Structure formats: structure tokens, C-alpha cells
Image (spheres, rainbow, N blue to C red):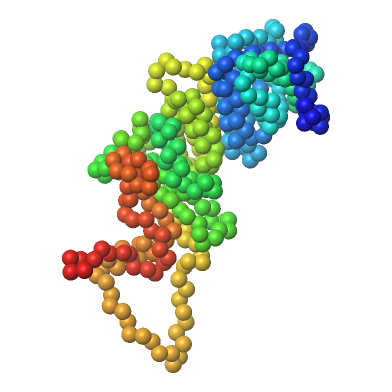
Amino acid sequence: LRAGLRSQQTHIICGVQYFNKSTSTMLILALTGPQIKHFKMVLQCLNKIGTELLMEATQSKLKLQAINTSKSAFFAITFDKTFFESFTTNGVQVVQAGVLLKHALAAMKTSKVSRMQMEVDPQTYQIIICMEGQNGLVKRYRLESMQSDILDANLQRDDFPITVVAEAAELNRLLSTFQHSQEEITIIANPDTPEHTGPRHHACQLQSFLDPKKARSGSSLQTSMTVDAHSVFRHYSHQAGETCDVTFNLRDLRAMVMLCEHMQANVTIRIDKCGVPLLVEPHFNDSDHPGYSAELILATLVESQIGAAMPMPQDVIPQQQPDLIGQQHEPPLPQPPPQQQAGAEANQGNAGIVRFDHQGGDELAGFEGVEAEEEVMLQKAGMQPWEEPGADG
């Protein structure tokens, strides 16, 4: 109560049953039990994208939206009218309002809530949230709403030639391979044909992306994974006819993966090509639908990363010393065979890169179905690859 009195935007009244019965209130909805948990998770996922919650209610549904400050990620979640215990717009065709997500989440912190009611009145710029606890305690929050511009994405699902469907938990384990500070990743999708994927069906590759224009330290870790699309993904379809790649924000994708895990749904990623937004949405195998749907639209980098070598940190590139006159040189070391020498030169260009091969068979570092494609290369440039000793020791 004391904390609520210090805030000018939130007021808490405890122990008093109170609902706004004013006829000017346009939207009134109520939730109970598991519905409240779903609604809270939705707000938490939207908060990972943007800071403002945009609401649009019609007589049949409620749409919640969030967009990041750079306009590169758009997250929209639509609730059916049947999801709520009660839902009415009092005859109004469309009700629109906006509120800061941190204020809405502050009202959802109450534990052991049996019932929740929300009232939205854009004319008075007020949103009232009433939380009824199991112990009879009632908390009422009054939030200041703001003018909001509701957006609508105009994307046709049939226009995307590449579709990937993966289990949310499995995809989350794959993404956890990347560093927590990693911002962007690149997905390279190959046509599902033997000439493109090889005998192991490596139709998809995930790799970290580092902007060459940004300064980075020599400890930057770059990761690359090749994925067996037949054993890892639930579905993989490639109708483009050529290899395509998209580079996008990893943290934004994790918000949808977290929501799909809560919904117990698979994750569907629809890809076109670099420079074209990609679409991420939940996918359900049966009729177990939670009563709401979601879609995440992410902007992609215009430049293609196919064939581009991962940049090497400048402080680990070996510097060639000038040949001084009169300097004594040590005798040259014996050169390895041509095949080994070529492999060593390739490894020097990949210093700081971790490569994995995801097939769904073996285990590596706690990740089921991940094995090393070549080797984990963390040695500094110029070092020879490790060789196992022979039988003679």
C-alpha cells in the first residue's frame, strides 16, 4: 500500500470489493484460474520486445501488440472471446488503448489470484485492473492509458517458400548453444536434395553473426551448427530451389520460443530470403488450442551471408615481423604433408569458432543429438591441430 501511494500512476485499495460500473467503460473482461497464468505469460513475452502494450478489442477478440524501438520486431497475440470468463465491449465496434508494459506487469505480481477483471476506458485514459486473491484480499490498480497506433501485419503465409517446424524445447536447446550476449544469428537453408545436403541431410545451418562495423574483443566466440533437418525438425520444406539465408535478432526469437513452450506448441519459422521479414508462429499438432494465437515478425539483414567467412578478431591475427638486416634466423621447421598443411591453414581462419553437427544421435556437452562436425577450435591462430599419438606412443 505504501509503495502504491508513492506512485502517481498506480493506486491500490486493499480489502474493498470495487468495480467501475460507469457506462463510459467500453471494454470489460474477466479471467480465472489458468487463464490468468496464460495472460501473465503473454505480457512477459511482449515485454521482451517492446515497452508499450497496444490493445485493440472488437466484439469477438482482443489483440495485444508490442513493437521494439527500432521497428525491427513486431509481436502480436490475439485472444478469442471464448478464452475469457466474460468479455464485452458494451456495443462498441473497436476499442483501442495503450499502456506501459511495466505498469501492467506490476499489477500481475499478486500471487494466488482467483479472479482478475480489467476495464478499459480510452475516453478517460484509464485502465483499471482488479485482482481478487484466494484469501479474500482485493487489489485495485488504476493505470494511465495513452494514445496508441494499432498496427496490422500484411503477410501471406503461402508466400514463404521455406518452412521449418521444430519442437519449442528442442529449438530452445539449440539456441542456448549461442552465447547469452549474442545479438544476431544467421539461418542458412539449403534445398532438401542430395546434391545440396549430402548423405547426412544437412539442410540447415545456424551460425552467429558479428557486425564487422562494430568493435569487438578478441574473446568473441563465434558458433556454427549444421542441422539434420530430417531428425531434428518436425517438418522442413524448401521450395525456393536455391540456398537462402536470413540474419535476424536472436533475443526477439527467444521471446516467441518461450511463449510456445508455455503453450505446449511447436515453433513454425517461415523464411523467404535476406532482406524480407520472416514470420514465427506457434504450431499445434492436435485440437488442444489454448484459445489464443501469436505471430512474431522479424526484420532481416539485407546482405547475404552465404559464402562469407566469419571475421577473425584483429588481436589474434598473427603479425608478420619485418626481416631485419643481419638478423640470424632459425632453421626452417619441417613442413607437414600438403593435406595436413591445408587443414591447418583452414583452421587458422576459423580461430574462435565452435562448430557442431546436430543429427539427433550422440550427445555433446549436455545437448542431446549434437556431435562435433570437425573439432572445437578455440586455439589461437598459428597452432597446429592436435593429433592422437600412434601405437608407439
Whole-percent x and y of residue 2? 79, 29
Q: Residue at x 47, y 55 (%)?
A: 221
Whole-percent x and y of residue 147? 74, 26
Q: Quadrant of residue 162?
A: top left
- 106, 15: nearer the viewer: 15
Whole-percent x and y of residue 111? 63, 24
Asked if residue 143 lies left or right of residue 41, the reply is: right
Asked if residue 312 lies left or right of residue 78, the reply is: left
Q: Is residue 25 visible?
A: no
Image quarter of the C terminus? bottom left
Q: Is residue 373 visible?
A: yes
Q: Residue furthest front?
A: 135
- 119, 365: nearer the viewer: 365
Q: Residue at x 33, y 41 (%)?
A: 369
Up/down of 296 relative to 359, above or below: above
Q: Residue at x 43, y 39 (%)?
A: 173
Up/down of 145 relative to 192, above or below: above
Whole-percent x and y of residue 323? 45, 84
Q: Residue furthest left?
A: 391
- 1, 369: nearer the viewer: 1
Asked if residue 74 lies left or right of residue 282, the reply is: right
